[in-house]
Image (cartoon, helix red, strand yellow):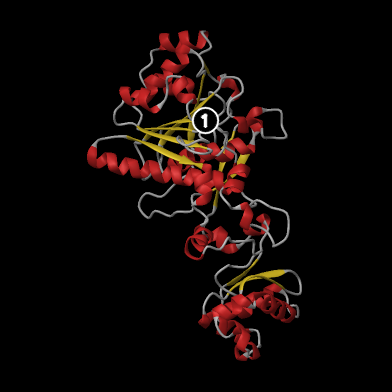
Amino acid sequence: MTRTKSGALDGLKVLDITQVMAGAYCSLLLADLGADVVKVERPGTGDDTRRMSESADIEASHAFVAMNRNKRGIAVDLKSDAGQEVIRRLAADADVVVENFRPGAMDRLGLGYEHLRAINPGLIYCSVSGFGATGPYRELGGFDLVAQAMSGIMSVTGHPGTDPVKVGVPICDLNAGLFAAFGVVSAYASRLLTGEGQYVDTSLVEAGIAATVWESNEWFGAGRVAEPTGSAHRLAAPYEALGTADGHIAVGAANQRVWTALCTAIGRPDLLEAEQYATNADRLRNRVDLSTALTDHLQHRTTAEWVELLRARGVPCGPIYDIAAVHRDPHMIDRQVTDTTTHPVLGSVTHLTVPVKLSRTPAHIERTAPLLGQHTREVLLQRGFSEEEFEALLASDAIAETIPHTIAAN
């Protein structure tokens, strides 16, 4: 893989044997930071996200493109003996393997951690699954919805007294990918010191549980089971979305100084004098009445007007954006939260960038997601396979490659 810019993980070789989101997001982050990530897919059908599209063309899936930029792609039949041997040879000089099959699946293929560690003792082997590699639920399938349900996230999301709702984004999938990438980088740092690889194991449900910081500690410390609070914070008030003349504004008056600034900015000094709102504990006990009082007053001006007034007084606040508004905001544009690549089927594609800015070795998006098997020949020949071996594997259907004339751009 030729990169025009250096990244923090330049030189790190990653074998990505993942499907859909959680594992793919882990390897995506590694790729954006400079790692040479080789995505392994099934010949013919590829990753399941290739079919998450309104188009019948598996190369026209925005879902796949979103999770697999900056990666090279090869097509290998993991169920064939020859295909398994291809993976073993690639793993022999890889730094990292990332997989997100159900625990035991890779072992049955002869491609589990112990199998590959015997070939490459320095290997970092990362597994992302629904419930982790151990425990009574280890063999259950992993889905973000189920993880949100069983981690407690759904029990505290939404408004009191309503049906359970999930977080609007696949938070357990994404958090699992983040924790996996963090685990890989931590294991890599350890290997630089010790020369030893290790097994990295994380799960969707634990990624969800890890997000329940306030809620779990409310149970640990006070024995209270947290309930939904809508947009409100469970430990500070007012800290929620409040109605305005034309919509809502998110206001975070999380301490006494900001509470004072809020009341002054909106012209309600009387609220500062009210005994029931004197302290944060008082405001929490009387949160519903406080929310009503604030909303009744804020209804007299627009969200934009209140944002301007409150920000001038140092009150943390903001409009509630839909996704289109997010990407029109001048601050987000200045922070370069998106970048583009050219895809051979989709044309220009916009991507979310890595939300971490490294001053010397920043992340870069340099290539679009691969076509199915686009780099099979390139990768295998680069990693020591001969032309004769490649052609024999191709003839046996253990591997597949994209027909070159279908590639209009890289």
- Disc 1 marks which residue? 102
From this view, report whether residue 311 is shown above or below residue 320. below
Name the foreground residue: 265 vs 73: 265
Q: Position of residue 176 (x, y in %)?
A: 50, 44
**Residue 306 seen by the camera:** yes
From this view, report whether residue 85 is shown above or below residue 192. above
Secondary structure category for the residue under label 1: loop
In this rendering, position of residue 240 left or right of residue 223: right
Q: Residue at x 37, y 43 (%)?
A: 185
Name the foreground residue: 279 vs 309: 279
In this rendering, position of residue 134 left or right of residue 345: left
From this view, report whether residue 124 is shown above or below residue 284. above
The outermost residue toward the front is 223
Q: Residue at x 50, y 19 (%)?
A: 78
Q: Residue at x 72, y 77 (%)?
A: 292
Q: Please tell me in which quadrant of the rendered image residue 340 appears.
A: top right
Amino acid type, label 1: Arg
Name the foreground residue: 242 vs 142: 142
Q: Position of residue 358 (x, y in %)?
A: 39, 53
Q: Position of residue 259 (x, y in %)?
A: 56, 81
**Dot 1: within a 10 Å radius of its alpha carbon, few (fewer than 14), some, or many (20 or more) residues?**
some
Q: Residue at x 53, y 43 (%)?
A: 204
Which image quarter is the N terminus in?
A: top left
From this view, report whether residue 290 is shown above or below residue 108. below
Q: Position of residue 187 (x, y in %)?
A: 33, 41
The outermost residue toward the left is 194
Name the foreground residue: 115 vs 57: 115
**Residue 367 seen by the camera:** no
